[in-house]
Image (cartoon, rainbow, N blue to C red):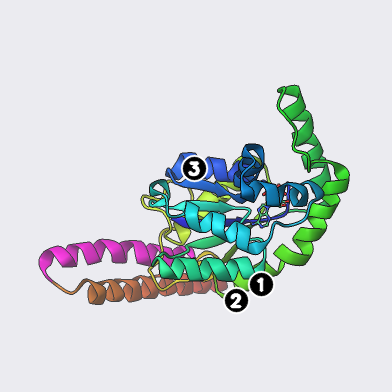
Amino acid sequence: MRIILLGPPGSGKGTQAQRLVQRYGIVQLSTGEMLRAAVAAGTPVGLRAKDIMASGGLVPDEVVVGVIAERIEQPDAKKGFILDGFPRTVPQAEALDALLKQKHMKLDAVIELRVNESALLQRVETRVAEMLARGEEVRVDDTPEVLTKRLATYRSLTEPLIHYYSERRKLLTVDGMMTIEQVTREIARILAAIGAVDGAPAKRAPGRRGGKGTPQKAVRRGTRSSTAGKASAKKAAKAARKAGKRPAKVAKKVVRKAGRKAARKAAKKVTKRRANA
Ligand code: ADP
């Protein structure tokens, strides 16, 4: 599974990424973390990034693209990854598309965490207070002034990615104002709905959709009856395969049948309601 978490600073990308790592055993690739490590180690990348990061600006595209290109080559990223903080500009997104294409890798979805801007400052302040209480070192860019700049940078350079991925039918938006637990559950639900995860660990998942469904379609159009149809279609396809028949044909038939059944049921309900009125 390969996904991107998109959202302004303080929207919960890091928190959710860690939970996804635990749940699905894939790696989190946070460009912020990688750059901070480079700064701490004093590497050439770190030297270029240090002042830019401290001021709330963006490190040049070619630098972060280079960092990511190297990172997704590593063996631990083979099973999948969550990109957190990358891409942050349209050229970065284009570079990522080219990179994935070249490596024959497919992006499953881009999950946008949508939050009220007014809540962000408070969230970052809370994060700083908690880090201080734990005796941890606070990020130099976690001050109200730099945060304001980071937000402005997000709005002008990163927000256009919402349109970019929406046009490519990859965007899934989650309400980031819910509790951490609720956001996690919602992400798991939509990942199961688009068929990005095997075994669908999420509860209330509307079921996996066939390969042709785009993420948006899958989540928005996943009605209960069509889901039921797909589930039985899957079963039928398996049985057909065992019996040596063509599974796709059988599955289609089952979906049609399930659809007809649901329609008949709905019609019956209307008739009954009318009779009672
Ligand atoms: P945030 O909490 O603001 O999302 P991150 O830890 O993701 O913070 O990133 C911190 C800083 O690192 C950014 O403000 C930026 O300077 C730099 N950075 C991280 N990712 C990128 C990227 N993809 N492109 C350019 N700069 C980046």
Q: Can residue 66 be seen?
A: yes
* Residue at point 66%, 72% (across, down): 163
**Which range is magenta?**
223-244
Asked whether, in this view, residue 152 is left or right of residue 136, the answer is: right
Residue 204 percent across, percent down from the top left: 49, 50
Amino acid identity at mark 1: His
Residue 146: in magenta span: no
Amino acid identity at mark 3: Val
Give the residue number, with chain letter if any, for mark 3: 21
Please tell me whether mark 2 sits on a helix, a strand or a loop.
helix
Specify the principal SS of the magenta part: helix
Residue contact at pointers 1 and 3, CB within 8 angstroms: no
Give the residue number, with chain letter if any, for mark 1: 163
Amino acid identity at mark 2: Glu
Residue 192 percent across, percent down from the top left: 45, 55
Residue 74 percent across, percent down from the top left: 42, 50
Mark 1 neighbour class, 10 Å CA radius: few under 14, some 14 to 19, many 20 or more? few
